[in-house]
Amino acid sequence: MSRQLLIITAPSGAGKTTIVQYLLGHFRQLAFSISATTRPKRDHETDGVDYYFLDHDTFQEKIRQHAFAEYEEVYPGRWYGTLRTEMDRLWNDDKCIVFDIDVLGALNLQSQYPEESLSMFIAPPSLEVLENRLRSRGTETPESLTARLQRAAMELERCNSFDQVIINDDLETACQKAARIVTAFLS
Ligand code: 5GP
């Protein structure tokens, strides 16, 4: 199989992770790119499954070593990046790699792999709905909620740079639309 990338991006809280999990469950050709991050692990997360959790110095050292295909300081002091070794691991296994990454990282990867990638932007119906979803998730402090909403506004402005935009009004409908797009991409 040729090297393929399925880049999925969205403002935090738009339902991206759920759609990614749905696609991973439906297409055996897909495999998830486990990112590295310096943000603290959440209770339900496992190191090496959800993320590779790194301390700040280790992350910066890997930047100097050019170990990342892309990286971003997504929130102040919170770094996230895609390790080249992770991409090689999945491509060596003949997988189409699925990326769940922020908008700037997605634009970066898309420009590095214009022919091999399909990019999907998952949009919330509105910023208000996004705020309600983030609040009810209960993972944010007031400060991190504000940071996520400010960033979401910037990210929404860039939605037209992606191959496909899916408005996540109804999760089931959004998952089905994403699946149809992926079927066409993989065939
Ligand atoms: P969270 O902290 O909610 O897991 O993720 C915060 C944001 O960072 C999300 O938009 C997520 O998609 C993004 N993100 C996760 N991994 C990466 C990565 O490797 N690179 C970039 N640029 N963003 C990432």
Image (cartoon, helix red, strand yellow):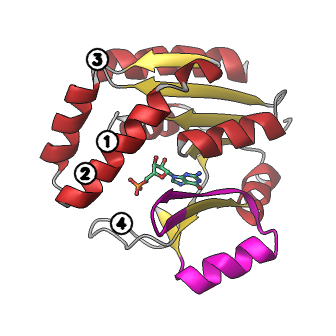
* Distance Cα–Cα, label 4 vs label 3: 27 Å
**Crowding near the residue tagged with mark 1, few <14, some 14–19, many ≥20 C-alpha atoms within 10 Å:** some
Query: What kind of element bears circle 1?
Result: helix
* Distance Cα–Cα, label 4 vs label 1: 23 Å
- Numbered disc in front, either 2 or 4: 2
Discs 1, 2 touching: Cβ within 8 Å: yes
Q: Amino acid at mark 4?
A: Glu
Q: Position of residue 145 (x, y in %)?
A: 25, 51
Q: Which residue is mark 3?
A: 169
Specify whether tag 1 is near ligand 1 (CB below 8 Å).
no
Q: Which residue is mark 1?
A: 149
* Distance Cα–Cα, label 3 vs label 1: 18 Å
- Residue 145's disc number: 2
* Residue 19 in view of the camera: no
Q: Amino acid at mark 1?
A: Leu
Q: Residue at x 65, y 34 (%)?
A: 6
Q: Position of residue 96 (x, y in %)?
A: 70, 39
Q: Amino acid at mark 3?
A: Asp
Q: Residue at x 21, y 27 (%)?
A: 129
Discs 2, 4 touching: Cβ within 8 Å: no
* Distance Cα–Cα, label 2 vs label 4: 20 Å
* Distance Cα–Cα, label 2 vs label 3: 21 Å
